[in-house]
Image (spheres, grey):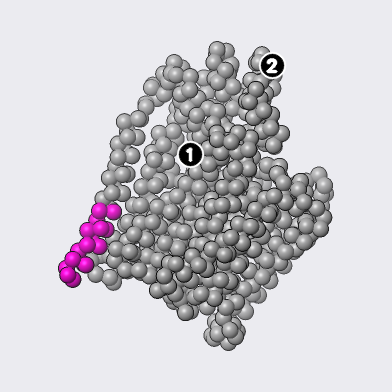
């Protein structure tokens, strides 16, 4: 039974032990991993943080403008702890990730029930591909620290009435605004949520739906306002979060195939020459020339706009290739690997975590967890949709949105915002007795979902082999 | 009683909406007050306080009419007496023209070795170059800062 009426103390009673376990797992990984060399965007974040500390302003990454909060956090850590700032930032990520765990448990408790809340807590605590982000320097854990509580607040607002509902809506807006200061990914999700909130309460008296939707947008805008004003000053454009869509179009709507789970492995000296023979049907023809970046445009925001237009031109000129490569994007999205496995493949861990035994065991465990989570989530999502607990639409909308954005550009990292939903769905599947029978008429859809998942794994089988070989 | 319960949430809702709106308005007004036109930005970049000049240069790069801005020679900054500005010249933040970018040869014009090291980090570690900032860079960066 959904526990909408469950007191908040129960939420904490369930969440605390799982949060403690999750923190222990993340701290162990941090200690065992040693200090891995900075990789790709980790180095770019550090570069920007150092520049901000040294020159007193936040620059941009030349190809894109990132939202400021993760860079600001790194800058503060450098300022306070010097070289140990990197460790301080990782400890901050470990500590704050308990908010994600508590949020996942809370969502399960509100939408499914106590048993599922325990299971989702256990899944969050032990899910290696997510836990590993806390000892890397990506923005994902900080992003989820805002996003997951925001989703929880939205669900609470759907299940509460009057003043309490308003407070939760207000909190959700503030948190969504915060998440947009970390990553741009959910920039189009905010208006969709507002639309959903309005739709959900459209028949309530006194324009309540409109009032709630407006409050959600206004509170998010209040958080973003200083950043938007700063961007208008520096770039001459109103940028609500970041300007990286152009760079993503360059990667995703272009005549080349870039999967960042695989690309660094192909380029590593240790694996030189072992390029996976990707299934040619699903990638752009080898003789097709990719369009170049708009490096000639000096303004970063305008450059992003030009690159978006070039990407859309490419789609218009190559509709067939576009459609087939979208299947490849989906396959990359569900490829059962993670940045943890990639790091192992690149031999990035100088500590005990990189020893052959832990490397192989950790990689197999991490990949197995992805496989199990994806397989369980399909019936779990169907059951979740069938239950129609108030606020379920929020999780389903988030899931649909994240899957849709993966059609542009994808790797296992783009799956991260989807994980809270998958934990809840998998927990529901695991806590449902006689799952197959419980699915009822949705069994056919579940079977089709599994068939699609297997098909997508088949598309990326050459890449998967390389990932496994590298990590072994 | 029933009137109170139905009016109170409405009042609460209105006050939350108003608070957000007022805050956004305040930020917009402050931003307008801080706004600097191109002439002011140019003045800040050329004669402003040393700490404010890098930001003014970066903003100029984004807002200035490109062709006009590309005539600004970043090498002029290398002649500055201020170490911060000499170092900033190497970030290549204020030009996208490869012809104007400072090079390794320009590093030799920096006499102070610590300053030269920092400049070399900025020169090499742009996000578009294959060489990114490393842990070794950070070790040296912070150990020199402590000296």
Left or right: where B134 falls relative to B72: right
**Residue B21 location in percent, x, y?**
29, 48
Q: Can residue A51 be spotted in the picture?
A: yes
Subunit ID for the residue under disc 2: B
Q: Residue at x 69, y 22 (%)?
A: B104
**Which is more toward the observer, A86 or A183?**
A86
Subunit ID for the residue under disc 1: A
Question: Are callouts 1 and 2 both on one chain?
Answer: no
| Nearest to viewer (mark 1 / mark 2) | 2
Q: Quadrant of residue A372?
A: bottom right
**Residue A32 location in percent, x, y?**
72, 51
Q: Quadrant of residue A61?
A: top right
**Which is more toward the observer, B113 or B105?**
B113
Left or right: where B147 falls relative to B56: right
**Residue B27 location in percent, x, y?**
33, 39
Residue at numbered disc 1: A302
Q: Is residue B18 above or below residue A389?
A: above
Marks 1 and 2 sit apart, C-alpha to C-alpha, by 35 Å
- Number of numbered callouts drawn: 2
**Which is more toward the observer, A260 or A254?**
A260
Magenta residue check for B11 = yes
Q: Residue at x 27, y 58 (%)?
A: B13
Dominant secondary structure of the residues highlighted in magenta in the image? helix
Q: Residue at x 44, y 15 (%)?
A: B47
Residue at numbered disc 2: B108
Q: Secondary structure at mark 2?
A: loop
**Residue A260 location in percent, x, y?**
67, 51
Which residues lie in the magenta part? B1-16
Magenta residue check for A376 = no
């Amino acid at each position: 039974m959904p526990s909408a009426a469950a007191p908040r103390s129960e939420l904490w009673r369930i969440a605390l032990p799982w949060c403690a376990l999750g923190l222990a797992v993340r701290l162990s990984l941090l200690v065992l991993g040693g200090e891995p060399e900075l990789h790709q965007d980790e180095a770019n974040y550090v570069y920007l943080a150092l520049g901000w500390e040294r020159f007193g302003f936040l620059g941009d990454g030349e190809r894109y403008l990132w939202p400021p909060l993760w860079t600001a956090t790194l800058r503060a850590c450098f300022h306070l702890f010097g070289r140990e700032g990197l460790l301080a930032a990782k400890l901050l990520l470990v500590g704050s990730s308990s908010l994600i765990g508590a949020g996942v448990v809370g969502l399960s408790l509100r939408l499914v029930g106590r048993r599922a809340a325990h299971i989702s807590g256990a899944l969050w605590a032990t899910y290696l591909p997510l836990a590993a982000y806390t000892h890397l320097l990506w923005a994902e854990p900080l992003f989820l620290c805002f996003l997951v509580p925001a989703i929880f607040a939205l669900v609470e607002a759907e299940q509460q009435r009057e003043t309490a509902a308003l407070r939760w809506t207000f909190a959700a807006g503030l948190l969504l605004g915060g998440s947009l200061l970390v990553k741009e990914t959910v920039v189009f999700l905010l208006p969709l949520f507002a639309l959903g909130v309005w739709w959900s309460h459209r028949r309530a008296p006194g324009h309540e739906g409109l009032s709630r939707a407006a409050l959600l947008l206004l509170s998010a805008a209040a958080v973003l306002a200083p950043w938007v004003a700063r961007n208008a000053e520096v770039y001459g454009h109103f940028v609500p979060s970041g300007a990286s869509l152009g760079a993503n179009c360059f990667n995703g709507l272009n005549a080349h195939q870039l999967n960042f789970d695989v690309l660094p492995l192909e380029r590593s000296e240790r694996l030189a020459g072992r390029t996976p023979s990707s299934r040619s049907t699903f990638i752009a023809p080898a003789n097709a020339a990719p369009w170049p970046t708009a490096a000639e445009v000096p303004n970063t925001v305008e450059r992003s706009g030009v690159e978006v237009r070039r990407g859309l031109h490419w789609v218009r000129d190559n509709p067939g290739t576009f459609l087939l490569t979208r299947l490849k994007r989906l396959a990359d999205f569900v490829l059962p690997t993670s940045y943890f496995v990639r790091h192992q493949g690149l031999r990035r861990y100088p500590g005990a975590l990189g020893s052959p035994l832990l490397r192989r065991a950790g990689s197999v465990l991490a990949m197995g967890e992805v496989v199990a989570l994806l397989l369980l989530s399909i019936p779990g999502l169907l059951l979740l949709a069938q239950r129609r607990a108030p606020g379920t639409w929020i999780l389903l909308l988030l899931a649909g949105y994240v899957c849709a954005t993966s059609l542009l550009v994808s790797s296992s990292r783009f799956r991260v915002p989807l994980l809270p939903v998958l934990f809840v769905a998998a927990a529901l599947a695991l806590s449902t007795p006689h799952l197959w029978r419980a699915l009822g008429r949705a069994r056919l859809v579940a079977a089709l979902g599994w068939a699609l998942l297997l098909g997508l794994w088949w598309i990326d089988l050459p890449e998967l082999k390389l990932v496994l070989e590298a990590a072994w | 009683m029933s009137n109170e319960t139905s009016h109170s949430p409405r009042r609460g809702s209105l006050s939350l909406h108003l608070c957000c709106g007022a805050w956004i308005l305040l930020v917009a007004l402050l931003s307008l007050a801080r706004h600097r036109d191109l002439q002011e930005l140019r003045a800040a970049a050329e004669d402003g306080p040393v700490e404010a000049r890098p930001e003014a240069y970066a903003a100029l790069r984004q807002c200035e009419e490109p062709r006009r801005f590309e005539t600004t020679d970043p090498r002029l900054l290398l002649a500055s007496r201020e170490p911060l500005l000499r170092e900033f010249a190497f970030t290549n933040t204020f030009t996208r023209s490869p012809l104007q970018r400072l090079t390794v040869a320009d590093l030799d014009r920096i006499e102070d070795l610590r300053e030269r090291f920092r400049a070399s980090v900025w020169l090499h570690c742009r996000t578009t170059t294959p060489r990114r900032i490393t842990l070794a860079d950070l070790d040296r960066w912070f150990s020199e800062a402590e000296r």
